[in-house]
């Protein structure tokens, strides 16, 4: 157990996916609306101490659950789940946010899969592979 990692109260819902960044920070995603009483709908990044990283803010929050994610080498995060939009931007069950949490508008899955995405992986060539109930 890492006694230096103090998550406090944590999330108010479940965590469905986690990714460890090379710098030791952890990105969590799931069915929560806050972390330690700070608004964070579905996704948050934690510092190496377990505290909330205020420099990672997803303002275009998903309108459904995030079930899976994959961290790209540039720090971007590909998300998969049961959402249809991030903010006012249509992103049918697949989206990408930058290393600061901003929606990456250059990553547009179009109509996307027709149902739930439960797995996201990256190939060595950088292509994204998704799996789920579609």
Image: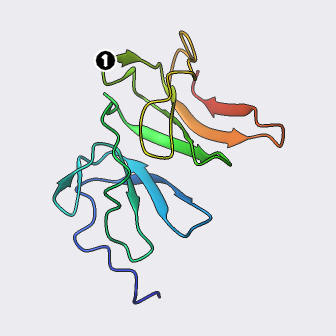
- Which residue is identified by label 1? 88
Residue at 39% from the left image edge and 80% from the top image edge: 5
**Colour convention of the picture:** rainbow
Residue 6, percent from left and from top:
33, 79
Count of numbered tags:
1
Residue 89, percent from left and from top:
38, 17
- In the image, taking residue 116 as reference, residue 12 lies left or right, namely left
**Foreground residue, 5 or 129?**
5
Residue 106, percent from left and from top:
56, 21
Q: In the rendered image, which quarter is residue 46 located in?
A: bottom left
The quadrant in which the C terminus is found is top right
Compared to residue 59, the image places residue 113 above or below, namely: above
Compared to residue 2, the image places residue 90 above or below, namely: above
**Foreground residue, 51 or 111?**
51
Q: Which residue lies furthest to the left in this view?
A: 37
Q: In the rendered image, which quarter is residue 20 located in?
A: bottom right
Compared to residue 23, the image places residue 69 above or below, namely: above
Residue at 46% from the left image edge and 87% from the top image edge: 2
Residue at 76% from the left image edge and 37% from the top image edge: 126
- In the image, taking residue 123 as reference, residue 25 lies left or right, namely left
Q: Which residue lies furthest to the top in this view?
A: 111
Callout 1: SS: loop
Compared to residue 39, the image places residue 6 above or below, namely: below
Residue at 64% from the left image edge and 32% from the top image edge: 131
Residue count near mark 1 (Cα–Cα under 10 Å), binned few <14, some 14–19, many ≥20: few
**Foreground residue, 66 or 4?**
4
């Amino acid at each position: 157990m890492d006694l230096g990692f103090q998550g406090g109260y944590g999330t108010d819902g479940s965590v469905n996916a986690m990714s460890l960044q090379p710098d030791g920070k952890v990105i969590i995603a799931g069915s929560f609306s806050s972390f330690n009483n700070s608004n964070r709908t579905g996704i948050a990044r934690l510092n190496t101490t377990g505290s909330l990283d205020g420099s990672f803010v997803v303002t275009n929050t998903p309108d459904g659950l995030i079930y899976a994610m994959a961290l790209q080498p540039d720090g971007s995060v590909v998300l998969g789940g049961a959402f249809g939009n991030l903010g006012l931007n249509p992103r049918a069950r697949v989206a990408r946010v930058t290393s600061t949490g901003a929606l990456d508008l250059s990553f547009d899955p179009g109509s996307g899969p027709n149902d739930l995405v439960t797995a996201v992986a990256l190939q060595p060539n950088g292509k994204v592979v998704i799996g789920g109930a579609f």
